[in-house]
Image: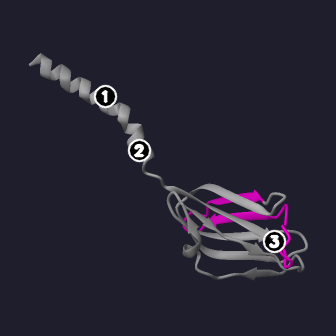
Amino acid sequence: MSRHLALRCWLFLVSFLFLPVALSAQQTLGGITGEVTDASGAAVAGATVTAVQDQTSLSRTVTTNAEGVFTLVNLPIGNYSLSIVNQGYETQKYPGILVQADRTTTVNAAMKVGQVSQSVTVVTNFTEGLKK
């Protein structure tokens, strides 16, 4: 009887070694990436890109690099609203961006020259731009 008890204890302890592997397979994070350009197609460096999750109001902000590219990683899954702001351009707003587990949604933006008080809201279907 004690041999069976020892075997059960050993199996119980070994099962905890594999628990982190099983849990890490349940990915609940995704991302949003894209390129910000002006009306002529030139990269807009230094633009502020903010993603706000609709359900929780979680907010993440990044800045575009010299090529106008931004990447928001490790976003909890859900729907997001994205806004892109840069001095001398109209604010661009993209509501309804779906972030799915272990996927990156691409949102490219073309900024329009404008005043600081102007903003544009773009509505489209972002599920087509998903890539793994």
Of callouts 3 and 1, which one flags the residue occurring earlier in the amino acid sequence?
Answer: 1
Q: Tell me if mark 2 has few (under 14), some (14-19) or many (20+) residues whose alpha carbon lies within 10 angstroms of its own.
A: few
Residue 9 percent location from the top left of the image: 23, 24
Q: Secondary structure at mark 2?
A: helix
Vertical placement of residue 107 versus 62, above or below = below
**Residue 62 falls within the magenta-colored stretch:** yes
Q: Tell me if mark 1 has few (under 14), some (14-19) or many (20+) residues whose alpha carbon lies within 10 angstroms of its own.
A: few
Q: Which residue is mark 3?
A: 37
Marks 3, 1: nearer the viewer:
3
Of residues 65 and 88, the one nearer the viewer is 65
Q: Residue at (81%, 57%) from the top-left corner?
A: 65
First to last magenta residue range: 37-63
Of callouts 1 and 2, which one flags the residue occurring earlier in the amino acid sequence?
Answer: 1
Q: Residue at (56%, 58%) from the top-left corner?
A: 30
Tell me the number on the disc at residue 23. 2
Q: Secondary structure at mark 3?
A: strand
Q: How many discs appear?
A: 3
Marks 2, 3: nearer the viewer:
3
Residue 126 percent location from the top left of the image: 59, 75
